[in-house]
């Protein structure tokens, strides 16, 4: 779960009865702020950073913990100043 105003990402495990338990190390500080939208693709979490416009990429470990990958956050000229809000993956 991304916290827009605090620029952190919270991770939870979901129990059999639906209860949420914080994952060790949570919350993780998102380098670019604020974390606006998140999507998971395989073992990576992609976080759209609304201002200044970038995408942070996190590796998801088997225990659910996160580590930001080298070079992240990624910025392109199209995103700079555009305040991206969402991310989508093509099949």
Image: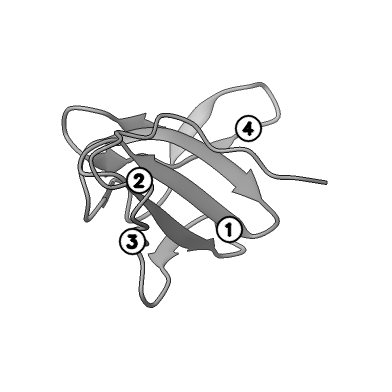
Q: Residues within 10 Å of mark 4 (few under 14, many from 20)?
A: few
In the image, what residue occupies the spot 22% across and 50% down? 32
Q: Secondary structure at mark 2?
A: loop
Residue pointed to by mark 3:
73
Q: Position of residue 82 (x, y in %)?
A: 30, 35
Q: Is residue 27 left or right of residue 61?
A: left
Q: Are marks 1 and 4 in contact (CB under 8 Å)?
A: no
Question: In the rendered structure, are the residues bearing label 2 and label 4 in contact, judged by CB atoms less than 8 Å apart?
Answer: no
Q: Are marks 3 and 2 in contact (CB under 8 Å)?
A: no
Whichever of labels 1 and 3 marks the residue nearer the N terminus, that label is: 1
Q: Residues within 10 Å of mark 2 (few under 14, many from 20)?
A: some
Label 1 with label 2: CB-CB less than 8 Å: no
In the rendered image, the residue lying farthest to the top is 18
The circle drawn on residue 44 is 1
Disc 4 target residue: 15
Q: Tag 3 or tag 4, which sits nearer the N-term?
A: 4
């Amino acid at each position: 779960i991304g916290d827009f105003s605090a620029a952190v990402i919270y991770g939870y495990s979901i129990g059999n009865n639906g209860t949420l338990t914080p994952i060790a190390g949570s919350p993780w500080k998102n380098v670019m702020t604020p974390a606006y939208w998140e999507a998971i693709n395989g073992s990576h979490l992609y976080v759209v950073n609304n201002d200044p416009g970038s995408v942070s990429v996190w590796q998801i470990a088997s225990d659910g913990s996160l580590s930001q990958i080298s070079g992240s956050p990624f910025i392109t000229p199209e995103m700079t100043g555009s305040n991206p809000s969402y991310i989508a993956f093509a099949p």
